[in-house]
Image (cartoon, helix red, strand yellow):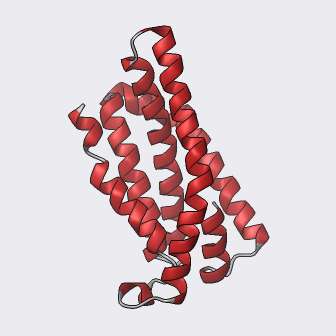
Amino acid sequence: VSTYCLFGSRFMGYGQPQLSATFSSGAGVAVLTQLLLFPRLVNSLGEYRTCSLGLLGVGLGLGGCQLLRLQPFHTALYLLNRIGAGVADTSVATIVALTSRGREARARNLALIQSTRAGARIVTPVLSGGLFDVSSNHSRGIFAAVPGSLPYLIVSTMLLTFAPLPLAL
């Protein structure tokens, strides 16, 4: 969120109203995805395929919205990212709950997920802010064409690389 605030204001011309609308829309889409789409995906594809699909959605949406800055395509890709996040986050929790042995293990494992996410919210803004700065201010090659995209493209590449992993479990 913090890096997208920098990105949106610097490269998309967003002010506070546009950023608030973007984040609120993204949160709303993620919640609707978890309530309406996720149960149907799990019923038709299963937990593991649904998780892979969610990771694929985040990877394509996150990387795509950095490369394609023309509206309404940028916003559509941003929302794809949020839909994918709604599917992937819920899938991971579902898989952990289903594969944990017993109540205590399930509670411990779900708590570890929450702790890991909390730790990531502390560390990632610093890392992504530095990568954003490097690709915004000192860019050459591809980053000269799409400044500010480095943190998003790294994460997108990682997600697209690991999207098939749940299928191997």
Q: Residue at x 52, y 42 (%)?
A: 86
Considering depth in this image, is 148 or 25 the residue closer to the camera? 148
Left or right: residue 40 compared with residue 17:
left
Residue 128 quadrant: bottom right
Q: Residue at x 49, y 70 (%)?
A: 73
At which x and y percent is residue 97?
45, 20
Residue furthest out toward the right: 17
Residue furthest out toward the top: 102
Residue furthest out toward the left: 168
Q: Is residue 129 above or below residue 106?
A: below
Q: Is residue 65 above or below residue 159?
A: below
Q: Is residue 86 above or below residue 101?
A: below
Considering depth in this image, is 39 or 146 the residue closer to the camera? 146
Q: Is residue 160 above or below residue 112?
A: below
Q: Residue at x 41, y 68 (%)?
A: 153
Q: Is residue 71 visible?
A: no
